[in-house]
Image (tube, grey):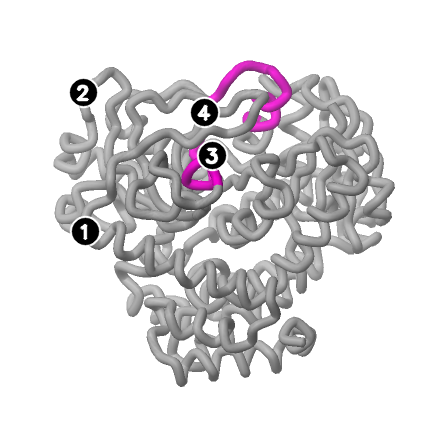
Amino acid sequence: MRLMIAGGGGFRVPLVYRALCEGPFAGLVDELVLFDVDESRLAAIEAVLRDMPAGAAPAVMVSTDLGQALTGTDMVFAAIRPGGTAGRIADEHVPLSLGLLGQETTGAGGISYAFRSIPRMLELAEAMREHCPEAWLVNFTNPAGMVTEALVPVLGNRVIGICDSAGGLVQRAARAAGAPLAEGVLDGVGYYGLNHLGWLYRLAPDGRDLLPALLSDHTALETMEEGRLFGQHTLLHLGCLPNEYLYYYYKTSQATEAIVQQHQTRGATIHSQQQSLYPSLLQAPHPYGLWDAARRSREEGYLAEARTHGEQRDETDLAGGGYERVALSVMRALSGGGTAQLVLNVPNSPALPAGSAEVAVPGLPADAVVEVPCEITPDGALPLAQDRPDGHFLTLMKHIKEVERLTIRAVVYGEREAAVQAFAAHPLVGSLPLGRQLLEGYEAAFPELTRLWG
């Protein structure tokens, strides 16, 4: 298999390479192509890969020529960040300046991120149609669900969105309940939602639902990230385990206050780290060790605003599966290496267009991209039927789906007013005047946005 990574100079690319060199994915890929628009970042990551201890390592080539990188490719893995980490700082600071949550993928920051990501990903999808029309696109570019939905009209079922957050939740819950799941198996698991907005509502690997007992077990809940984030009282009230990103909805004021009180935002911390790290990787005698230390530091700071002062992430929380294992599990199943079950971002029904009665999440449109357990075969990812979401779960999903679709419309059709409405409609904003202020703030931070509106 020839695998091309779009965003090949990205910080986490060595995780993919390491997984391809050892363990169950060794030998899956013969040739790994790293594509990026930044030559210096490509060179730094290439240096890390050369220094890594490797077993059955695939051949590696780097390229800044998109057509060259795509030609002959079987799989494309996309993890790009238009605007870089400097863009993330603006994504966070514009809403914070208005007293709103400033977070990378949730709320106003996620909409801004999508305004930059969707155009570049549409360009990639069109280039794939020209240079490798039979290739699959496994998308990790954020906001992953929204970006994936924007690409479906171009690539159909050959685009699949991934995220390690939901799968990590399922694995952590199963371990806490004393019934760890085999990788690629989700029998008896009930999960529905959108990317970074979902709930684990059933955990019955052997037919008996273990979730009620887990929610009643304070000690067991304390062993997992979500149990500590939300607290037992909230979880018992919900009757399920929310994705960790729902912290920003359920405890908005605490999250916003914690971000404001930090010395710098998460984006600023990562930007500062990478500004010094990448040049150092090119000079270091052992760049892999330098990169690995930075990786660990970065993982420990994930969702830091949601934890009490000084609390560190538990090792089992950091070992929830990893986005690289999710991506490679999808690719292995697509290439005929056996079926797998994973939580993925796919259209609610494989029977498009909208209007089909057969949907994975009842209550949402058939063509809406949802995040649910899927069965992956060489024919693609088939979403598995879930229960109809109760009460506020479905209401919130519908609300956020409306925001996502306004965002996509703003980009695809160049409708500035749709961009304003997307901000205003978001439940973490909820105001048309604030929606206009947000868009004006982001247009000042990213002047290229004004070109979207024609």
Looking at marks 1 and 3 on the same chain, the residue that comes earlier in the sequence is marked by 3
Q: Position of residue 422 (x, y in %)?
A: 45, 69
| Three-letter amino acid code at the position of disc 4 | Glu
Tell me the element at label 4: strand
Q: Which is more foreground, mark 3 or mark 4? A: 3
Amino acid type, label 2: Arg
* Residue at the spot 29% in from the left edge and 56% down from the top edge: 396
Taking the image as shown, residue 5 lies to the left or right of residue 173, namely: right
Q: Is residue 64 visible?
A: yes
Category of crowding for the residue at label 2, using alpha-carbon neighbours closer than 10 angstroms: few (below 14), some (14–19), many (at least 20): few
Residue contact at pointers 1 and 2, CB within 8 angstroms: no
Of mark 3 and mark 4, the one earlier in the sequence is: 3
Label 1 sits on residue = 391
Numbered disc 1: secondary structure: helix
Q: Nearer the viewer, residue 77 or 282?
A: 77
Magenta-colored stretch includes residue 243? no
Residue highlighted by disc 3: 350
Q: Where is residue 399 in the image (x, y as percent from the top left)?
A: 33, 60
**Quadrant of the image containing the N terminus:** top right
Instruction: Tell me whether the residue at label 4 lies in contact with that at label 1, contact meaning CB atoms closer than 8 angstroms.
Output: no
